[in-house]
Image: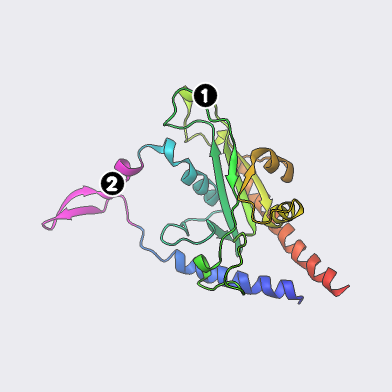
Amino acid sequence: MGKELEKQRALEAEVMRQQQKNTEYYEYKENEAFTFDGQPVFSVLDYWRFQYGQLMNQQEYIAEFLVSKALGIRKAENVSFWTGYDLSYCAKRIEVKSSVYVHPWNKKRTSKVRTFSIAPSSNLYWSGKKDENGKKLARQNEIYVFCLNTNRDINNADPLIIDDWDFYVIPTFVIDEMCSKYGNPNQKTISLGVVRKLSDGSVKWDQLHEKINEAIDRVDRHIIEIDERECD
């Protein structure tokens, strides 16, 4: 086993441990009750309706939900801890980024600028272990899923219509290489235009699972290629 592959396998083992840790939280049920003086007053469902009834401003979380459902993931990993990535699948860390044209706070026009955050961070936030020099920043995921809600009709926007979403899947090493090529390895944002160029095109929700599996294969091949180059 090459050096890079050995390092990746150790990382994946840590990711699996973190996944178990981050999904051990108790899941409240909709019919459980808030109580006062020992008596039920209102339900968890009442709270959900109060806090999350306006789904138009929840589309960042809807995007994560859709990706998780496409992969068959039942419990979110990043609800109790700041993990540095949104979810893990096949021991690979996945970061989900979203962008929309229609916002509930703007009823007159759609948003024009489409960018996504790709800012590097420290692994201390999810693994509890500092990088070798304690300050090195890196993108804490192997795969990005960029989610774009393509609806531009302000009067007929519906966050429940999954058909409106386009998904772009890009291995993180592709983004890292691009940023390094242009002399900005710590680049913080990426435009939709660049996302389209770096990806193989968008897919719809029913194709997302397969596309992520393809990206995982690319990541694994990339690691093997690094080891092979070092052996030459």
Q: Which residues are magenta?
A: 28-52
Q: Is residue 29 found left or right of 33 in the rendered image?
A: right
- Kind of residue sitting beneath label 1: Asp
Q: Is residue 140 found left or right of 199 in the rendered image?
A: left
| Distance Cα–Cα, label 2 vs label 1 | 30 Å
User: In which quadrant of the rendered image does the C terminus lie?
Assistant: bottom right
Vertical placement of 165 versus 209: above or below? above
Q: Is residue 173 found left or right of 65 in the rendered image?
A: right
Q: State the residue lying farthest toward the left.
A: 37
Residue at screen point 84% across, 68% down: 229
Q: Residues within 10 Å of mark 1 (few under 14, many from 20)?
A: few
Q: Is residue 12 magenta?
A: no
The image position of residue 231, as x and y in percent, is 85, 74
Which of the two labelled residues, at mark 2 and mark 1, occupies the earlier sequence position? 2
Vertical placement of 3 versus 158: above or below? below
The image position of residue 105, as x and y in percent, is 42, 31
What kind of element bears circle 2?
Answer: helix
The residue labelled by disc 2 is 47
Q: Is 137 or 102 nearer to us in this picture?
A: 137
Q: Residues within 10 Å of mark 2 (few under 14, many from 20)?
A: some
Q: Are marks 2 and 1 in contact (CB under 8 Å)?
A: no
What kind of element bears circle 1?
Answer: loop
Vertical placement of 80 versus 170: above or below? below
Vertical placement of 91 versus 62: above or below? below
Residue 153: give its label.
1
Which color scheme did the rendering employ for the protein?
rainbow
